[in-house]
């Protein structure tokens, strides 16, 4: 029975060590997933922060675009009012004939500039649009040249041209700010896309972390159960060994007693005792 219990204890000890090693392995794996998850979460926060910065810059540039447009539109309105007066003069003096007036030509230019700014077009189409703007601008110059000899009209024309020049400069600024706004918008979208990817990866790492941690906990519980059984085996085996030792001692004491009684009987019969016989009687407490 004792041998059987010892063999079972060896098996249990092996199982215990295996559960312990597996637990430690899974805990290490869980820690790896936890670090990966934390790094990905930090990366996600960085992407979101960068996206917010680009969003703020986009909104800032869009506001600037609207503010510059308002100024540009005001300048164009002032220029259009002056060109309208000039067109009236041209009609009265027969300059326009069947051609379009400066105001109408300028409005066409504004529409074409707006198309250039807002529409997506290929290089050939954009080049064609630019040529149309140049042609209309040339028509305006030709009409303006005809009426520059009138001093009053000439003054209005110079003033209108100054308004138009300032409006054109603002239009270039509008285009620049609009492109910046679009660039920051694209970068914002890219940051949010990257944030979504890293967030998904972080969620997957967290899922693996939980899975590994739960498996490690299960192995730990198995290890604890094995340790408890090992203690139970040790108690039973220890008890059996202690009982065996006690039985062996009792048998030895009984044998000594029997032998000592024989020697004692010899002593009583008058036989001479040796030193070993005396020691034996002392051990048996007969003397």
Image: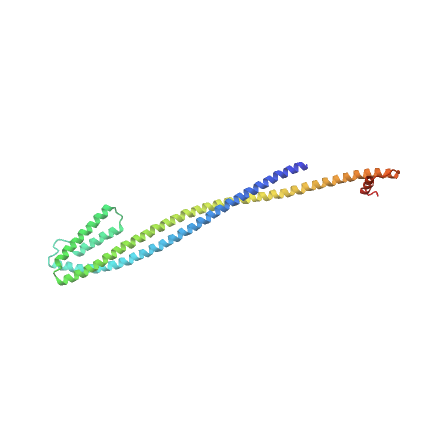
Q: How is the image coloured?
A: rainbow
Picture residue at 50% right of the left edge, 47% below the top = 31
- Asked which quadrant contains residue 77, the reply is bottom left
| Residue 145, visible in the rendered structure | yes
Q: Closest to the observer: 274 or 284?
A: 274
Which quadrant of the rendered structure holds the C terminus?
A: top right
> In this image, 187 relative to 103: left or right?
right
| Residue 286 position in % (x across, y down) | 83, 42
> In this image, 214 relative to 55: left or right?
right
The answer to whether 274 is drawn above or below residue 93 in the figure is above
Which quadrant of the rendered structure holds the N terminus?
A: top right
- Asked which quadrant contains residue 244, the reply is top right
- Asked which quadrant contains residue 242, the reply is top right
| Residue 76, visible in the rendered structure | no
| Residue 159 position in % (x across, y down) | 19, 61
> In this image, 248 relative to 195: left or right?
right
Picture residue at 21% right of the left edge, 58% below the top = 165
Question: What is the number of callouts on the image?
Answer: 0
| Residue 17 position in % (x across, y down) | 58, 41
């Amino acid at each position: 029975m004792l041998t059987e219990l010892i063999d079972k204890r060896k098996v249990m000890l092996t199982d215990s060590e295996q559960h312990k090693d597996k637990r430690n392995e899974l805990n290490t794996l869980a820690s790896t997933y936890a670090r990966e998850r934390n790094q990905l979460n930090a990366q996600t926060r960085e992407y979101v922060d960068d996206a917010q910065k680009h969003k703020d810059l986009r909104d800032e540039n869009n506001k600037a675009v609207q503010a510059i447009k308002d100024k540009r539109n005001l300048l164009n309105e002032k220029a259009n009012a002056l060109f309208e007066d000039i067109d009236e003069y041209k009609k009265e003096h027969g300059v326009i004939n069947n051609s379009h007036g400066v105001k109408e030509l300028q409005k066409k230019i504004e529409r074409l500039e707006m198309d250039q700014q807002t529409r997506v077009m290929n290089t050939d189409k954009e080049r064609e649009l630019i040529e149309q703007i140049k042609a209309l601008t040339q028509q305006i110059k030709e009409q303006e040249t005809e009426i520059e000899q009138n001093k009053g009209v000439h003054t209005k024309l110079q003033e209108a041209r100054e308004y138009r020049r300032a409006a054109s400069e603002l239009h270039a600024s509008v285009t620049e700010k609009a492109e910046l706004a679009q660039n920051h918008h694209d970068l914002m979208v890219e940051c949010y896309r990257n944030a979504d990817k890293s967030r998904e990866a972080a969620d997957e790492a967290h899922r693996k972390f939980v899975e590994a941690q739960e498996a490690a906990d299960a192995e730990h519980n198995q290890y604890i159960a094995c340790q408890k059984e090992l203690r139970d085996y040790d108690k039973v085996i220890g008890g059996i060994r202690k009982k065996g030792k006690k039985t062996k001692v009792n048998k030895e004491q009984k044998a000594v007693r029997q032998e000592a009684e024989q020697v004692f009987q010899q002593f009583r019969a008058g036989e001479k005792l040796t030193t070993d016989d005396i020691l034996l009687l002392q051990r048996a407490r007969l003397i």
